Image (tube, rainbow, N blue to C red):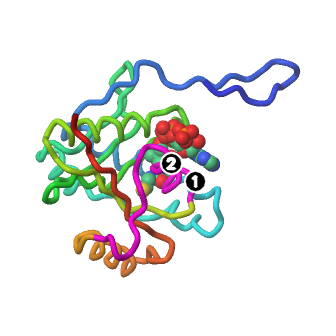
Amino acid sequence: MVTQLPLDGVPLVKSGPTGVTIRPVRDADVEALRQIERSAAQAFRLIEAFSWLAVGEVQSAEVHHALLAAGTNWVAVDDGDHPLGFLSAEISGRDLHICEISVDHLHQGFGIGRKLIAYAIDSATRQGLEAVTLTTFRTIPWNCPFYERLGFRMLEEEALSPRLRDLLDLEDAHGLRRDTRCAMRLDITTP
Ligand SMILES: CC(C)(COP(=O)(O)OP(=O)(O)OC[C@H]1O[C@@H](n2cnc3c(N)ncnc32)[C@H](O)[C@@H]1OP(=O)(O)O)[C@@H](O)C(=O)NCCC(=O)NCCS
């Protein structure tokens, strides 16, 4: 719950959605998820240097379908089963790699992103994987600093696996400048 500035002496209280749960993505969800990614990207308008991302390409329907078939595409829904956010990942070697995470702009800041990442980490743990990885922007507050608070660490150049180095290079070739990006890793520790 977020309390905003009082208006006419009456505090405005913005409540998050109720009964948020995570479930596997279904084929019928895919177009809603592509719409959520477009909505989520509106957050980048807050930072002038990155505002161009607000109108960027979103993950294709084909990739969504492939990842849901692989069992690594998850959606956060409200108590009416309406999609609010999603996390798409793929298994690469011994890692679960997060390809995309987006939460509808109006529902950001209520812990849904944190919940989706916890779910992905839990899934990777149950599958006996070694790590969860991702690439992201270094300085955007809801990117690298957010993931660091969740236990991910930024990988220095020399610590990059060939897969993550190639991915950063590929992103650079698509306009996501290498010096603004980083790869991150969370090691799974099993008791
Ligand atoms: C990243 C994203 C999925 C997080 O989802 P969410 O539901 O908002 O996540 P949460 O509410 O669990 O947490 C958001 C965190 O970002 C922080 N944050 C969000 N907006 C912020 C801002 N403008 N300034 C500073 N911090 C901000 C919050 O403080 C919170 O951190 P905390 O939980 O440690 O306090 C969502 O912000 C999003 O869709 N962003 C646009 C797309 C994007 O950046 N995707 C990730 C690409 S790697």
**Is 34 covered by the magenta stretch?**
no
Residue at the bottom extreme of this rendering: 173
Find out whether residue 150 is within the magenta segment: yes
CB of mark 1 within 8 Å of CB of mark 2? yes
Q: Earlier in the sequence, mark 1 or mark 2?
A: 1
Q: From which residue to which does the magenta span run? A: 140-160
Mark 2 is surrounded, within 10 Å at the Cα level, by few (under 14), some (14 to 19) or many (20 or more) other residues, namely: some
Inspect this view and state whether residue 38 appears.
no
Classify the position of the N terminus by image quarter.
Answer: top right
Vertical arrangement, residue 19 with respect to residue 27, above or below:
above
Would residue 156 be found to the left or right of residue 12 on screen?
Answer: left
The percent position of residue 107, horizontal first and vertical second, equals 51, 35
| Placement of 8 over or under 115, stated as above or below | above
Task: Determine the residue positioned at 41% across, 56% down.
Answer: 153
Q: Secondary structure at mark 2?
A: helix
Label 1 C-beta lies within 8 Å of the nearest ligand 1 atom: yes
Q: Name the kind of residue labelled 1 in the image.
A: Pro
Q: Residue at x 54, y 26 (%)?
A: 16
Image coordinates of residue 129 in percent, x first then y, are: 17, 47
Q: Is mark 2 within 8 Å of ligand 1?
A: yes
Residue at which label 1 appears:
141
Q: Which residue is mark 2?
A: 146
Q: Position of residue 21 (x, y in %)?
A: 34, 25
